[in-house]
C-alpha cells in the first residue's frame, strides 16, 4: 500500500464503503433474491450493497491513483468512531422500549457528539426534525409496525 494518497478522506471512505457494501451483500444472501419482476427480500439489500461497494471502490481507486498532493492518510479517531457505533447500537436497543420518536432523538444527539464541534441547539433541532420525519415516513407513509412512543406511555 502506498504511503501517500491524494485524498486521505477518499481513501478511508472508500475502504468503509467497500467493506460495508460487501458485508451487506453477504448478509443479504441469506434471503431469497427473486427476480427483477418479482423481487424477494434479499434483492434490494443486495443491489444497495453492490452499489455501495462500487462507490467505495471508485473512491478508493481515486485516492490510490493520484498522489500529487503528498497528503498522508489521516489517523482514525477511535473515540469518534466508537460514538458513532454507540449511536447505531442505541437505535437497536432503544427502539422497542422507547419508540421511534424518542429513539430517533437520542440517536441524533449521540451521533452529534461524534462531531468535532458539538452545538447542542443544532443537535436538538436536528433530533426533533428527524423524529418527526421518521414518524411521518415510517409510521404514516409506510405503515410500519414499530412502537411510536415509550411502552409506559402507551398503556
Image (cartoon, helix red, strand yellow):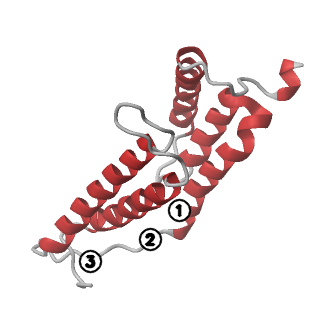
Q: CA distance from mark 3 to mark 1?
A: 20 Å
Bin the neighbour count of mark 2 within 10 Å (Cα to Cα): few under 14, some 14-19, many 20 and up: few
Where is residue 148? Give x, y as percent: 71, 23
Which residue corresponds to the image point at 48% horizontal and 68% vertical from the top-left?
A: 77
The answer to whether the residues at label 3 and label 1 have Cβ atoms under 8 Å apart is no
47 w.r.t. 67: above or below? above
Q: What residue appears at the point 60 percent right and 50 percent down from the top-left corner?
A: 88
> In this rendering, is residue 105 above or below 20?
above
| Residue occupying image coordinates x 66% and y 27% | 101
Give the side of residue 118 with respect to residue 151, left or right. Answer: left
- Is residue 146 or residue 106 the one in the foreground? 146
Residue closer to the observer: 63 or 25: 25
Of residues 107 and 41, the one drawn nearer to the viewer in this rendering: 41
Q: CA distance from mark 1 to mark 2?
A: 8 Å
In what element is the residue under mark 3?
A: loop
Is 129 placed left or right of 152 in the picture?
left
Report crowding for label 3: few under 14, some 14 to 19, many 20 or more residues within 10 A (C-alpha).
some
Q: Are marks 1 and 2 in contact (CB under 8 Å)?
A: yes
Count of marks placed on residues: 3
According to the picture, the residue beneath numbered tag 2 turns out to be 76
Q: Residue at x 73, y 26 (%)?
A: 147
Residue corresponding to mark 1:
81
Amino acid at each position: 500500500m502506498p504511503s501517500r494518497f491524494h485524498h486521505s478522506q477518499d481513501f478511508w471512505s472508500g475502504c468503509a464503503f467497500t467493506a460495508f457494501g460487501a458485508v451487506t451483500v453477504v448478509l443479504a444472501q441469506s434471503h431469497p433474491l427473486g427476480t427483477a419482476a418479482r423481487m424477494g427480500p434479499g434483492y434490494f439489500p443486495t443491489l444497495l450493497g453492490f452499489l455501495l461497494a462500487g462507490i467505495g471502490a471508485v473512491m478508493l481507486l481515486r485516492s490510490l491513483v493520484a498522489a500529487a498532493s503528498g497528503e498522508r492518510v489521516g489517523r482514525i479517531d477511535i473515540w469518534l468512531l466508537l460514538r458513532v457505533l454507540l449511536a447505531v447500537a442505541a437505535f437497536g436497543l432503544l427502539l422497542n422500549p422507547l419508540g421511534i420518536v424518542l429513539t430517533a432523538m437520542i440517536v441524533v444527539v449521540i451521533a452529534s457528539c461524534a462531531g468535532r464541534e458539538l452545538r447542542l441547539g443544532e443537535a436538538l433541532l436536528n433530533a426533533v426534525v428527524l423524529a418527526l420525519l421518521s414518524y411521518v415516513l415510517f409510521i404514516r407513509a409506510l405503515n410500519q409496525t414499530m412502537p411510536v412512543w415509550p411502552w409506559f406511555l402507551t398503556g
